[in-house]
Image (tube, rainbow, N blue to C red):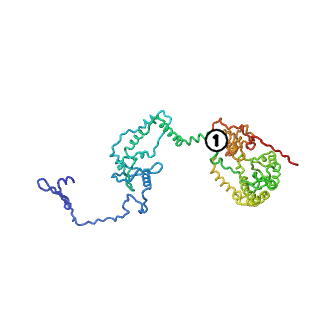
Amino acid sequence: MDWLSYHRAVIVCYEKIVRIPLPNGEILEIHGERPEKDPKSLSCIKADEVRLDDIRTVCDFPEVSSDDLTGPPPELSNQLKELQEKGFIRPSHSPWGAPVLFVKKKDGSLRMCIDYRELNKLTIKNRYPLPRIDDLFDQLQGACYFSKIDLHSRYHQLRVREEDIPKTAFRTRYGHFEFTVMPFGLTNAPAVFMDLMNRVLKNWKTPESPSEIRLFLGLAGYYRRDLYWWPGMKRDIAEYVSKCLTCSKIKAEHQRPSGLLQQPEILEWKWDKITMDLVTKLPKSSSGHDAIWVVVDRLTKSAHFLPIREDYKTEKLARIYINEIVARHGVPVSIILDRDGRFASHLWQALQKALGIKLNMSTAYHPETDGQSERTIQTLEDMLRACVMDFGGSWDTHIPLVEFSYNNSYHKSIKCAPFEALYGQKIFQIKERLKTARSRQKSYADKRRKPLEFKVGDRVLLKVSPWKGVVQFEKKGKLAPRYVGPFEIIERVGQVAYRQKLPQELSCIQDTFHVSKLKKCLAESDAQIPLEEIKVDENLRFVEEPIEIVERDVKKLKR
């Protein structure tokens, strides 16, 4: 086409003729092939009807209306608002304008980036030398301590000269803005920032005057008090505290209870296996009773509340037991009870051995072993409070009514009253209900506990202050240590108890304890809490000795 235009050729499309003027004035004509038919006539070509389905679809778009289309992500407007509030950007009327795009970070959030590539092409490069990684490693050779300064939005710490601010403009759908501080993405930003850091970060000049010394000491004191931190500080402190013997024996536990829930088997018959416990320190009644002996059947949940005096001897308790329990329900197979001195006496042990009863003593300071009695005592104490409010000192005369009310009340675990379970014919149903209730209870309890197991030879601390009004350590009273030891584990007893190798000072107490009363000792092996001034009785209760007897009174009773 350029050649035809240069020679001023004329193209007649209808006649298919090209006329080219020659330099001598003549015209050169080039004829093409003419159609045989009249060009004005239209030829009819038979063709198939083209349907819309026959057209290939290159890109299929979803059928949505304009109302269904969402707007731009709110991240853009949020970041623009934040930058404006900080004073980093302002509205602009600059002829410059860079596009904005978003890049996803590792944490899933979006980073607003400005495409300054066209501006960088027109920028004269700053040839300031940037540090090489090899040189930095050479400088760190032989160093023992390392520190790092990470500036927040480091480029935004530098202001842009007023005449250069329009060049940083960028455009968005929310308007035209420009940076008043150095933005990210400029080609000279790293060099300018590195030059500033080399001029700012330098060795502190040696103070030469009292005012300079006070200035340095004030700065050092500020960082020492308020900004102390090092990498892994929490982990290091936790490790140090765990190995500190003083912290181990003093600090209270703030963790989930140890040991999963262990449940006794479901019984086959009524009053075969029972539990018993004593409720003491009650107000003395008009009859002289100040305690209640609680005996509970583990299957039917029926109970007997026997008012007694706390100073009853073992012989008196044995007579009450024979008359009230054995005479009514027969000889049980086993009894779960705590380590009260009367239950641990030789007379009580000999009586149960003669009757063929197995005694299951609870571990020290672990009342959960006799959970059935403890739960019954909670209900009994609530009922007794009401009796004391209404009947005062004659509460023991109303104990039969309290017992009847308890045994005639609905129990959720067996889904009936203890009297109905005891005298009815629902033992099979009760066993199935107990299985369901125990399964639910164990699942609930185990989720809130941690399994804790020790090995033979491990050194553990023994918790000795779980009960108020019982523990006395030297003369410290309530401020006594929570743990003593460490002691070596010599045997595992069952699933949740361990036997310790106790020193001679504690030889008078039993040496088996529940796992919840033990804590692993991580301190040095030669560290141990002194036990010279500790005196305990057979129930692991510290004996408090008086400092001085200031007065003595002796009374002789008349016969």
Residue furthest to the left in view is 24
On the question of residue 133 being in view, the answer is: yes
Q: Position of residue 117 (x, y in %)?
A: 36, 48
**Which residue: 36% across, 61% down?**
55
Image height of 8 relative to 539, above or below: below
- The quadrant the N terminus occupies is bottom left
Is label 1 in a helix, a strand or a loop? helix
- x, y percentage for residue 177? 38, 53
Q: Position of residue 254 (x, y in %)?
A: 62, 47
Left or right, residue 251 beside residue 167 = right
| Displayed quadrant of residue 65 | bottom left
Give the image location of residue 448, x and y in percent: 63, 50
Residue reaching furthest to the front: 210
- Dot 1, crowdedness within 10 Å: few (<14), some or many (≥20)? many
Residue beneath label 1, please?
Answer: 248
Q: Is residue 54 left or right of residue 264?
A: left
Q: Nearer the viewer, residue 88 or 20?
A: 88
Q: Is residue 558 left or right of residue 372?
A: right
